[in-house]
Image: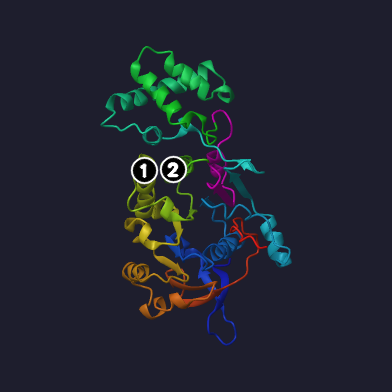
Amino acid sequence: MVNELSIGTLLESEDATPSHVLAAKLNRHTFWCGQSGSGKTYALGVLLEQVLLQTRLPLVILDPNSDFVRLGEIRDDAPADAAAQLAARDIRVFRSSAEDGAPLHVKFLGMPVRSRAAILQVDPLYDAEDYNVMLQLEHELGAFRGASVPDVAFDHTKLLAYLRSSDDPARHRLAMRLENLGVADWRLWAWGHRSVIDDIDERPDATVVDLGGFATPAESRAAALAVLDHLWEHRDDRIGRLIVIDEAHNLCTPTPSSPVEKLLTERIVQIAAEGRKYGLWLLLSTQRPSKVHPNALSQCDNLALMRMSSPRDLAELGEVFGYAPESLLERSPGFAQGQALFAGGFVDQASLVQMGSRLTHEGGSDVRVPLR
């Protein structure tokens, strides 16, 4: 049984001493950060590949920039033994765009009523009557769908027609919200088709949830909320999972504005505070630590820091992650691409690392400067 995950070599070691992360300590929350151009996403891929190779820990990756959609595509220069092992892993990618791959769907009526209300901007207090109708509809809609319409045929048109078949003005208002906000037409909804939640429950080695191709940020955040809601609702199953949230500042901001943003931040902070005992372990990755909610940041016992030039961000990291030596934090602005400081429980001691090579392809790509 391998507990050490090879991630690269120790910087400034004469014989390129291998550097490792302790797999057993991924049962603590991890913070992964580095400014644009530091190699943050590439380096994170190195760790995730090792998790796939050496552990049975299921990965759930919320991927807003489509950076990990090629996690199952192995490079031609990957060592043969590692390539064979990765090829045997069950890696499922769900796309929000119209590109090839499994479509990313979740069930609107499968989300908690509070989350559906947030999507429809129905406030439990200010829109008390409409919210109360949503509560009353819970059992009623389930019975109607099961008895009257086959699940595969139940779509937004059936839902709108059902709401409008009543004389209740509040139900008509809900139908109007679905239409006026464009929610009824979101490509995200599974209706009678398979949801990404069904696949997550089958515990593949990795589930990549591509959030980058939706038409609006609201749709992307609703997809993330559906996944996190489900994992939290089933926390008592105590299935160890590493929940990777890339660009975490987009989903866990200190200043959420919309109802869905507020719920998302609340859910991530809740998992950060209480999820460890249920086997829900976060890996939050971002360019800007100051843009991540402090109540999530402060729960992270592992730190991977790449190049970070902002004095404000470095000062905050020093305050939050007291286990990271100040002398090493101070070197971060001078890191070359692919160099990182690892500190906390998942390493034997704080150290500077040159990250190793990827075995799989990166998904996202920069827009190139056009040349004449």
Rendered residue at 56%/45% (across/down): 213
> Can you tell which quarter of the image residue 94 is in?
top right
Rendered image: mark on residue 263: 1
Residue 364 versus residue 87: which sits nearer the camera? 364
Magenta span covers which residues? 191-214
Tell me if residue 354 comes above or below residue 285 in the rendering: below
**Picture coordinates of residue 269, whole percent (x, y):** 35, 51
Judging depth in this view, the residue of 48 and 327 nearest the camera is 327
Count residues near mark 1 (Cα–Cα under 10 Å), then give few for <14, some for 14-19, many for 20+: many
Mark 2 and mark 1 residues within 8 Å of each other at the beta carbon: yes
Mark sitting on residue 59: none
Pick the front one: 103 or 80: 103
Residue pictured at 39% horizontal, 24% vertical: 174
6 sits to left or right of 256: right
Q: Which of marks 2 and 1 is nearer the N terminus?
A: 2
According to the picture, the residue beneath numbered tag 2 turns out to be 225
Instruction: Say few, some or many: other residues with alpha carbon within 10 Å of mark 2 (under 14 / 14 to 19 / 20 or more).
Output: many
Q: Which residue lies furthest to the front in this view?
A: 372
Q: Mark 1 belongs to which amino acid?
A: Leu
Badge 1 element = helix
The amino acid on which the numbered mark 2 sits, given as a three-letter code, is Leu
